[in-house]
Image (cartoon, rainbow, N blue to C red):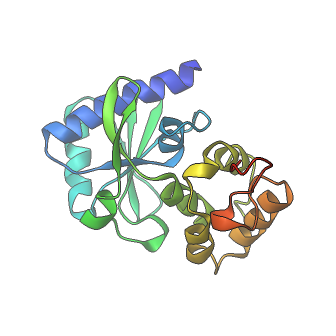
C-alpha cells in the first residue's frame, strides 16, 4: 500500500467516525469503494455519497473535526480537505440525487481499520462510466477496475444504465475485445471446465 493510499484510508476513517457520530447517513463510492472490494488502489480522493439535505451539515461537522472546506466549481458536490487528502461529498452524481434507497444499496465491509458502508461494484462502475466525455475519456483506471471486479459487476445492468453514452459503449466494447468479459451470461466469459473467469 502506498503512502498516499494509507493517508486516504486514515482520512476515510476520520470522516466516517465524524459522520456516524453526527448520525449523517453516507456510503463509500469511487476508487476507495473499488479498493475495498478487491480492486486497484486509489490515490486520488475519497468519494462519499450523502443526501443533499445532509451535505452542508456534513461539511460543518467535518470542519469542527479539523478538516477545511473548499468551494467546488460543481453544483452537485461539496469538498473538504484533511491535510492534502481530498474528500468529495457527492449528493447528485451524474444528475442522480442520492436517496435513502441508494444509500441502502451499500454493504458494510472492512475498509482499512473500520467497517463502512460500501456501494456495490456495479454502481461504482456505472458512475465512473457516466462521467466520461470528450474531455475525460481515460480508460487507464477503468480497465484494472473492471478486470479485478468483473465477477461482482452486473454487466447487463451496466449496459442498460449507460446505453445513452457512446464513451461507455466504447469501453464495454474494449473490455469485450480484450476478453475481460464476454457476451455470455451477465458478461462473464466462460472458460474450459465450466467455470467463469
Residue at 33% x, 63% y is: 102
**Name of the residue lying farthest toward the left:** 22
Where residue 144 sits, quadrant-wise, is: top right
Residue at 21% x, 35% y is: 18
Quick check: 74 left or right of 26? right
**Picture coordinates of residue 114 (x, y %)?**
32, 28
24 versus 171 height, above or below = above
**Name of the residue lying farthest toward the bottom:** 164
Quick check: 40 left or right of 34? right
Q: Determine if residue 185 is in view.
A: yes
Where residue 166 sits, quadrant-wise, is: bottom right
Number of marks: 0
Quick check: 123 left or right of 89? right
Image quadrant in which the N terminus is located: top right
90 versus 14 height, above or below = below
6 versus 87 height, above or below = above
68 or 165, which lies in front?
Answer: 165
**Picture coordinates of residue 131 (x, y %)?**
60, 64
Q: Determine if residue 132 is in view.
A: no
80 versus 166 height, above or below = above
**Picture coordinates of residue 191 (x, y %)?**
78, 50
177 or 17, which lies in front?
Answer: 177
94 or 117, which lies in front?
Answer: 117
Residue at 49% x, 59% y is: 123
Quick check: 33 left or right of 25? right
Amino acid at each position: 500500500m502506498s503512502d498516499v493510499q494509507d493517508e486516504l484510508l486514515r482520512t476515510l476513517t476520520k470522516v466516517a467516525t465524524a459522520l456516524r457520530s453526527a448520525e449523517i447517513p453516507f456510503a463509500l463510492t469511487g476508487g476507495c469503494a473499488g479498493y475495498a472490494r478487491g480492486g486497484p488502489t486509489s490515490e486520488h480522493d475519497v468519494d462519499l455519497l450523502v443526501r443533499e439535505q445532509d451535505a452542508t451539515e456534513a461539511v460543518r461537522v467535518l470542519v469542527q473535526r479539523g478538516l477545511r472546506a473548499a468551494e467546488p466549481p460543481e453544483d452537485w458536490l461539496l469538498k473538504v480537505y484533511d491535510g492534502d487528502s481530498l474528500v468529495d461529498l457527492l449528493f447528485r452524481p451524474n444528475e442522480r440525487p442520492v436517496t435513502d434507497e441508494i444509500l441502502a444499496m451499500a454493504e458494510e465491509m472492512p475498509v482499512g481499520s473500520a467497517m463502512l458502508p460500501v456501494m456495490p461494484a456495479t454502481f461504482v462502475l456505472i458512475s465512473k462510466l457516466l462521467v466520461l466525455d470528450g474531455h475525460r475519456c481515460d480508460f487507464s483506471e477503468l480497465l484494472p477496475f473492471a478486470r479485478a471486479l468483473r465477477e461482482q459487476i452486473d454487466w447487463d445492468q451496466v449496459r442498460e444504465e449507460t446505453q445513452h453514452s457512446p464513451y461507455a459503449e466504447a469501453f464495454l466494447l474494449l473490455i469485450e475485445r480484450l476478453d475481460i468479459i464476454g457476451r455470455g451470461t451477465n458478461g462473464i466469459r466462460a472458460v474450459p471446465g465450466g467455470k467463469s473467469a
